[in-house]
């Protein structure tokens, strides 16, 4: 959790609130209910920020996957998060150790971020086994193709109790982000609308534009920006047109 504590607490956006509710449901679920959950959506929609907030609130262990994650590297990271400083042994040994540790605190969730990187690999079933045998919730976070990929693994897919889809930022979320990133700066409706439209509600891209506004305000000593004073539509950094990535 050391890395998580370094991340600024996000504004209470809809995805943050929804993910926190998801974690609460998983922690408080019926003991006979399966323990997997999935939170998915396009890149930049604030899923990882939501996970950080939820992980801090519910003492969750947090592991981020990558392109070269293997069963061993994933279990190693999980054990480190669970408090084992030098995980050793075979994959089976490490799996058993993780199950025992998680079973000792079954209300502590395990969050696997960027799970789309492992969602087509056979060892994704390890996460189902960790949850089944420990009783602890395991939440997979990934991009929009994650649910479809998990359909290839019936033993994993049918253990998913909750499916949560991230949503793009709306006008209300924009105002929360603006107050968090640009305190004391008024952003006119035409500029706010242009940013929302051009970014397609992508949280990360909205934040990039808000950083630009805050920087321009500091340089020019302005307290209010409309679309014209910001530099027009061409100054707004938007999202390119592309198809979802295939992992």
Image: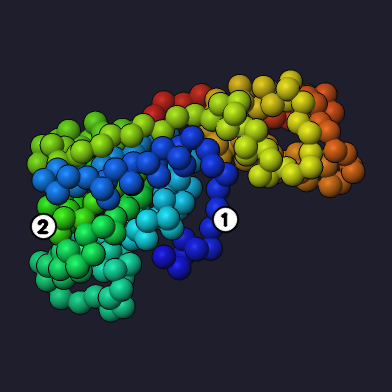
Q: Position of residue 9 (x, y in %)?
A: 55, 53
Left/right placement of residue 103 relative to residue 225 reads left
The C terminus lies in quadrant: top left
Read off the residue under disc 2. 133
Residue 10 to residue 200: above or below: below
Left/right placement of residue 169 relative to residue 214 reads left
Helix, strand or loop under label 2 = helix
The earlier-in-sequence mark between 1 and 2 is 1
Give the image's coloring scheme: rainbow
**Is residue 209 something one can see in this rendering?**
yes
Q: Residue at x 49, y 29 (%)?
A: 168
Q: Nearer the viewer, residue 80 or 178?
A: 178
Q: Position of residue 212 (x, y in %)?
A: 73, 41
Q: Residue at x 51, y 24 (%)?
A: 241
Residue 235 to residue 104: above or below: above
The N terminus lies in quadrant: bottom left
> Is disc 1 surrounded by few (<14), some (14 to 19) or many (20+) residues within 10 Å?
few
Q: Residue at x 9, y 41 (%)?
A: 155
Residue 198 to residue 93: above or below: above
Helix, strand or loop under label 1 = loop
In three-dimensional space, the C-alpha distance between marks 1 and 2, rounded to whole angstroms, equals 34 Å
Q: Residue at x 49, y 35 (%)?
A: 14
Q: Look at the numbered discs 1 and 2 and tell me whether their residues touch, using CB distance below 8 Å.
A: no
**Is residue 199 something one can see in this rendering?**
no
Q: Nearer the viewer, residue 143 or 36?
A: 36
Read off the residue under disc 1. 8
> Is disc 2 surrounded by few (<14), some (14 to 19) or many (20+) residues within 10 Å?
some
Left/right placement of residue 34 relative to residue 245 reads left
Q: Position of residue 90 (x, y in %)?
A: 13, 71
């Amino acid at each position: 959790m050391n890395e998580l504590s370094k991340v600024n607490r996000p504004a209470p956006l809809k995805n943050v609130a929804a993910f926190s509710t998801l974690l609460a449901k998983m922690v408080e679920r019926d003991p006979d209910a399966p323990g997997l959950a999935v939170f998915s959506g396009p890149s930049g929609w604030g899923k990882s920020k939501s996970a950080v907030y939820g992980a801090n609130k519910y003492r969750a262990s947090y592991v981020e996957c990558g392109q070269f994650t293997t069963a061993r590297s994933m279990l190693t990271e999980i054990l480190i998060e669970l408090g084992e400083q030098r995980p050793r042994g075979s994959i089976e040994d490490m799996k058993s150790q993780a199950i025992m540790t998680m079973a000792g605190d079954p209300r502590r969730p395990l969050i696997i971020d960027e799970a789309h990187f492992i969602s087509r690999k056979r060892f994704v079933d390890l996460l189902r086994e960790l949850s089944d045998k420990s009783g602890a919730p395991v939440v997979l976070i990934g991009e929009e193709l994650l649910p479809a990929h998990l359909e290839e693994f019936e033993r994993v897919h049918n253990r998913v109790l909750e499916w949560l889809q991230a949503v793009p930022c709306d006008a209300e979320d924009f105002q929360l982000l603006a107050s968090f990133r640009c305190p004391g700066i008024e952003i006119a409706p035409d500029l706010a609308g242009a940013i929302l439209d051009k970014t397609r509600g992508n949280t990360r891209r909205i934040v990039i534009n808000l950083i630009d506004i805050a920087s321009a305000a500091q340089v020019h000593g302005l307290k209010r920006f409309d679309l014209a004073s910001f530099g027009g539509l061409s100054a707004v950094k938007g999202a390119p047109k592309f198809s979802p990535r295939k992992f």
